[in-house]
Image: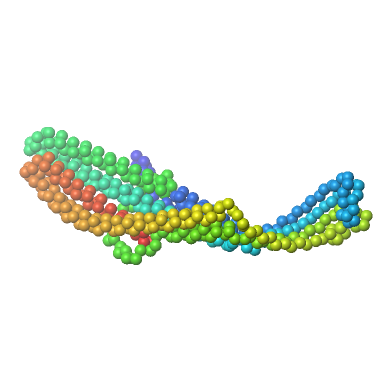
Amino acid sequence: MLIFFLLVYASASAQKSYSLAECITRAQQHNPDILLQNLNISRAENTLSQSLKSRLPMVSGSVSSGLNGGRSIDPFSNSFVQRTISYNSFSVSTNLLLFNGFSLRNQIEKNRANKEAEQVQLEVVRKEIRLAVIEAYENGVISREMIRLQRESLLDLEEQAESVKERIKEGLMASYSLMEAEAQIASARFELTIAENNYLLAKKGLAQLMMTEDDFELMVPQLLSPLILPENRVQHPALRVWDSRMRSARYSVDIARAEKYPRLSLNVGLGTSYSSGAVNEFNYFQQLGHNFNQFTGLGLSIPIFSNGLAASRIEAARIEENMIGIQKNKAEIQLNSQIETLKLELTTLKEKLNSAEINLKAQTRLYEATKEKFKEGLVSQMELNTYRLNREKAQVQSIQTRYELYFKNKILETFYE
């Protein structure tokens, strides 16, 4: 039996306890939203890399071989001959884009802006996960404190029940008083069960954010005074995302506008060939050297009529830019409203906590005084239970307000980081 209890104690001691900071760190490292956003960044970086490489010319080579039967042209005398001629040709060529209305340059800048947007979006995701962890941790801590409170209440009621038993033996109380005490104990045990279930549910939700299946406990934080936050708010990454997307949209307008400009390209190549029609005059390698040639050419494409497609693409890009501008303004208004609401809630919670603490002290004094009167037989057990419930309600209000103030402050801090 001793070994069993030692094993149970060792298992409980080895159970991991997480602080709020540790929960946030683990969630930000393992949450799939973070992993997916990292892949989005990699994809944007790959797209940017592709557009940067598009500035470099592409070099291609070709080899061809074939037979001409019947009547054909002798490649050296340019006269018609009646025989089968075999041939080989080799060439290397490249095409260099000289001008296309700066479309390629704008595409590179657009892809760079998209990459920056995805990188900033990672900060947004990290903040969102942080906020979700704070809320889940708050629920867990309050549930754990409710367990402590209900256990203290249950212990208090059990002590009262023992006192009632002694007084019944002494003939100072009726036997039904014990039934009242036992009913109160049963009610307290029920409330304790609810608190324990709420704690398990809160830990389950937190475990999902942390991507862990291990059981763990939550550290109850030491409640400190709220930090003094700066008046000038650092720009939230959610707004910086919209700034990057706005720049991307502007480059999209320039890319669409480039369709109205001419396109100039340079073609450069080398080539040679062999024909069996001249095998008597030159051997294979002599022909390759003799037929060596170079070519250079400029290609100019001028748009004349695009059936209105270019204008439509420009207008579509401008509409997208305007939509992003509206979405950014909306996000900024919502963010400022959220911050101001949090500040107002903090002010209200400070006042509420002060009132809750005063009420708790008053209800505690009244309950302790009523317990003394109960021992003297001056008040009934039902009256004592009423004062006990009033004190317990005051304790719940104090705990909930105290931790709500603490975690609301943590949430507001997140917007300033």
What residue lies at 45% left-to-right and 50% top-to-bottom?
33
Looking at the image, residue 365 sits to the left or right of residue 279; the answer is left
**In which quadrant of the rendered view does residue 411 lie?**
bottom left
Image quarter hosting the N terminus: top left
Query: What percent of the width, then of the height, locates residue 226?
Result: 29, 61
**Is residue 12 something that shows in the picture?**
no
What residue lies at 14% left-to-right and 52% top-to-bottom?
362
Residue furthest toward the left?
378
Between 168 and 32, which is closer to the camera in this rendering? 32
What residue lies at 81% left-to-right and 54% top-to-bottom?
89
Looking at the image, residue 207 sits to the left or right of residue 383; the answer is right
Q: How is the image coloured?
A: rainbow
Query: What percent of the width, then of the height, locates residue 181?
Result: 16, 38
Looking at the image, residue 101 sits to the left or right of residue 22; the answer is right
Between 48 and 193, which is closer to the camera in this rendering? 48
Image quarter hosting the C terminus: bottom left
**Is residue 64 something that shows in the picture?**
yes
Query: What percent of the width, then of the height, locates residue 191?
Result: 24, 41
Looking at the image, residue 412 sits to the left or right of residue 300; the answer is left
